[in-house]
Image: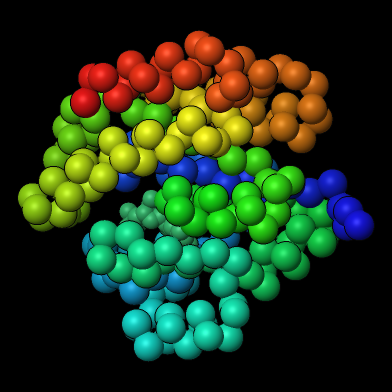
Amino acid sequence: MKLSNAKLFVISAPSGCGKGTILGEAFKSGNVFYSVSCTTRQPRPGEVNGREYNFITNEEFEKMISEDSFLEYAGYADHYYGTPKAPVLEKLEKGIDVILEIETKGAFQVKKAMPEAVALFILPPSVRELNRRLHKRATEEEDVIAKRCGQAAGEIEKSFEYDYVIMNDGLEEAVEDFLTVYNSAKSEDGKADKFKTENENIKNLIREVLNNA
Ligand code: 5GP
């Protein structure tokens, strides 16, 4: 039984791709619920417990796994990340759209459990550009940046399996493309079909980014 028309959006992008900025701009005034994940990594400067993440210990995370409290969870860059299940289901039942910003393994778990979820991948213009952006952000040590860039190509490979793919090659256009996908996935008016991965142009775009690694 479908409880409401609310949609669950699963959004992935390599670290440093600007997905936080795009979503912040797109939903300045929207009534959507951003799921706050749990993670075992340390907060970065400026991050607040309960806002960017619930920062918890390994023991706490593993207890939540054993209690089946996660909609999905995954290991990424030596840490656990997971989406608490209860708040997501509660919002969807209330008719509120939910946004998950998660990596690819978790995204596929969600799609398996809830096939009606909409999965969107945000591409960087190239892995080289991603590397430059991560250095500019300068929140991580060199070895962490190298590790994240190394992971990026593998993540981009997985984008073929998402429902939609857009590229962040400039904030304004990326926000516009994101909103096209968001609104169109809700109304099913076909306006976002050009961003569907079944589309040959999108497949070529992904191949281009991979070839420019
Ligand atoms: P960061 O450490 O840069 O905040 O996040 C690293 C990666 O973990 C990003 O790709 C981010 O989207 C992903 N991530 C954040 N929260 C979750 C979550 O709850 N589940 C999964 N599977 N990935 C997450």
Location of residue 64 with respect to 44 vertically, above or below: below
* Number of numbered discs: 0
Q: Nearer the viewer, residue 51 or 159?
A: 159
The x, y position of residue 72, in whole percent, is 54, 64
Q: Quadrant of the N terminus?
A: bottom right
The x, y position of residue 208, in whole percent, is 33, 16
- Quarter residue 40 falls in: bottom left
- Quarter residue 20 falls in: top left
Q: Nearer the viewer, residue 100 or 159?
A: 159
Q: Quadrant of the C terminus?
A: top left
> Is residue 205 left or right of 191 when viewed as pictured?
left
At x 72% / y 65%, what residue is drawn? 89
At x 84% / y 46%, what residue is drawn? 5
Give the quadrant of ligand 1: bottom left
Residue 16 in sight from this viewpoint: no
Residue 203 in sight from this viewpoint: yes
> Is residue 35 left or right of 209 when viewed as pictured?
right
At x 48% / y 88%, what residue is drawn? 63
Q: Residue furthest top?
A: 201
At x 53% / y 51%, what residue is drawn? 107
The x, y position of residue 4, in whole percent, is 87, 52
> Is residue 79 left or right of 39 when viewed as pictured?
left
- Quarter residue 16 falls in: top left
Location of residue 30 with respect to 49 vertically, above or below: above
The x, y position of residue 204, in whole percent, is 43, 14
What colouring does the structure picture have? rainbow
